[in-house]
Image (spheres, coloured by chain):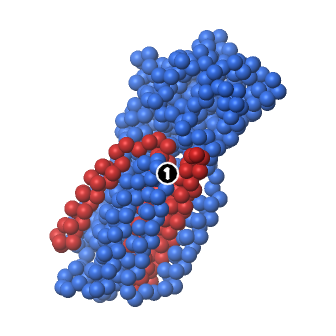
Amino acid sequence: MTGPVSTQDLIAHAGYLASVLLFMFGIMRMGKVRTARSGNQMAAGAMVLAMISQFVEMGQIEPWFIIAGLVVGSLVGIIVSIKVGMTEMPEMVALFNGSGGIASALVALAAYAFHRIPTVPLMNAGMGEAPPSIVNGLAVMLSIVIGCVTFTGSLIAFGKLSGKVSGSPVLLPGRHMINAALLIMALGGSVMVVFTTGGMPGLGIVVAVTVVALILGVMLVIPIGGGDMPVVISLLNSYSGLAAAMAGFAINSQVLIVSGSLVGAAGLILTQIMCKAMNRSLANVLFGGFGAEDTSSGKGGGADEYKNVKAAEGEEVAMILEDVESLIVVPGYGMAVSQAQHLVRELGDIMEARGCKVSYAIHPVAGRMPGHMNVLLAEANVPYEQLFELDQINNDFKNTDAVLVIGANDVVNPDAVDKKDSPLYGMPVLNVWEARTCFVIKRSLSPGFAAVKNPLFEADNTYMVFGDGRKAVEDIINNLKSS
Amino acid sequence: MTGEVLIGFYTFILACVAGYQLITKVPPTLHTPLMSGANAISGVTILGALAMTNGHGTIGATIIGCLAVVFAMINVAGGFMVTERMLKMFASKKK
């Protein structure tokens, strides 16, 4: 921006500044239960304002391509978001995320196509009249790399979460070497080329880097198992923000830089929270291929390893539940898979009507995305006041009559507390075994994601209720009702 | 290095720090909505997409830009709507 600033630019930038501030306050409000909804609306309003400001800055508008793009994109987004069920939320978030990633990569590609023709004036593009600098070129390449990695990574995550791709880790031999080579090719190549050409690299390089980045995204996510998806999703979320920020550098847009880095930082915080809840480092999640080695060598908790397992049918469970005064429900991924959340709530209502105190204990990494269980239980209208975090409720188990674990495994493994050589040792878990009686609804004794045996299943006060989560809960409810 | 780029760096670093500080302690209930809300905000790249589509550049740039508009808009519209749906659900059951 050299020379006098036009009124048009002044209005546009006032709009940008306002929208950036609104984004900030929006994100801030989204972090508190009471203000979350208004925070989201604020951010949505900020987006509209930013787009209007963009139109003001562009002045002359070529309507057809823009209208077509806006209409098609909005329709797809709105239809999908209305149709999606709460159980499909994790894969939906992954898909939207990938969509944002590829959009940033495309912006960078378009900016590249733009800069390549120096005779075309760069007006009306929000880029100013300055010729592309090394930084612009570098940002173009980085935006392509991060955006493409986000795109294919999110697609693989979507596949794993929706069951279209196997959720178990796929470990290629020498994958660390391959990934390192791909990363060096993508990043090193970009940097080198940009510096040697003093700005924009050649088309061949751009295409090559794009392809390498797309492959890298796939390679980075396939070795990661389904249980680690909460970490991966939040990390990819962070990447999509970073890609937008890089696109901002590519076209000199402060709005993109600010909003993109806000999202990048927010995603990073969530990633940290998830890692902490699993007592693992980010590097371990990304490169460890947790659980996979154990399963292949067959040492992880098969059914034959268990002794004295007590199984119970719905009828017996109902008989015991009739007399309990406090019940804590511990949901896990199994509840999501069998979509048992509504029945769980019904069971909770019946128990409450009988004068029993019902609460829910939510482990931070239960399920496949951050906050997965909270979303499902909210869908089933379980009152927010009945949901408790690990720290809030862990001391209550010892004073509780009964615990009902539905489709959770590793997050209720006592080995994490007292067995030093267990791979789970040190991970914060829910101390369900301290309760007087513990019911575990599970399809079989098969190991959970960590592929280790769970001594809870053979504890004296544990009853295993074998079967699909939904059917098992239904059975208990029917027996409670008929008694 | 042009002044605009330098300002960009300041902005980038400051916004990263701000973003990190803004949400230090998030209750687990909000993890999913916060993620999908932030995700929608990353669709801000729509601004770049609009600029590129409108850039009077080559037809290639326009078409790529238009594709970017589509994807970014899916991210923006879908992301905010889905977040709103979730948060509405959270709010409705509070007495």
Query: How many marks do you count on the picture?
Result: 1
- Residue A37 image position (x, y, % from top left): 49, 56
Q: Is residue A357 left or right of residue A391?
A: right
Q: Residues within 10 Å of mark 1 (few under 14, many from 20)?
A: many
The residue lying toward the viewer, choosing from A474 and A327, is A327
- Residue A274 image position (x, y, % from top left): 43, 39
> Going 61% across and 13% down the picture, which residue do you hit?
A461
> Going 34% across and 45% down the picture, which residue do you hit?
B24
Is residue A354 among what the camera can see?
yes
Q: Colour of chain A?
A: blue
Identify by letter the chain in red.
B
Q: Which residue is mark 1?
A: B33
In this picture, is A463 found above or below A34?
above
The residue lying toward the viewer, choosing from A350 and A232, is A350
In this picture, is A316 found above or below A130?
above
Is residue A197 among what the camera can see?
no
- Under circle 1, the secondary element is helix
Label 1 sits on what residue type?
Pro
The residue lying toward the viewer, choosing from A34 and A226, is A34
Where, by quadrant of the figure, is residue A115 drawn? bottom left
> Going 49% across and 27% down the picture, which residue do you hit?
A393
Q: Is residue A475 left or right of residue A63?
A: right
Q: Is residue A476 left or right of residue A67?
A: right
Q: Quadrant of the N terminus of chain B?
A: bottom left
Please give the chain letter of the residue carrying mark 1: B
In this picture, is B5 found above or below A92?
below
Q: Please, which residue is most extreme toward the right here? A: A482
> Going 52% across and 66% down the picture, which residue do you hit?
B77
- Residue B52 image position (x, y, % from top left): 40, 77
- Residue A475 image position (x, y, % from top left): 77, 29
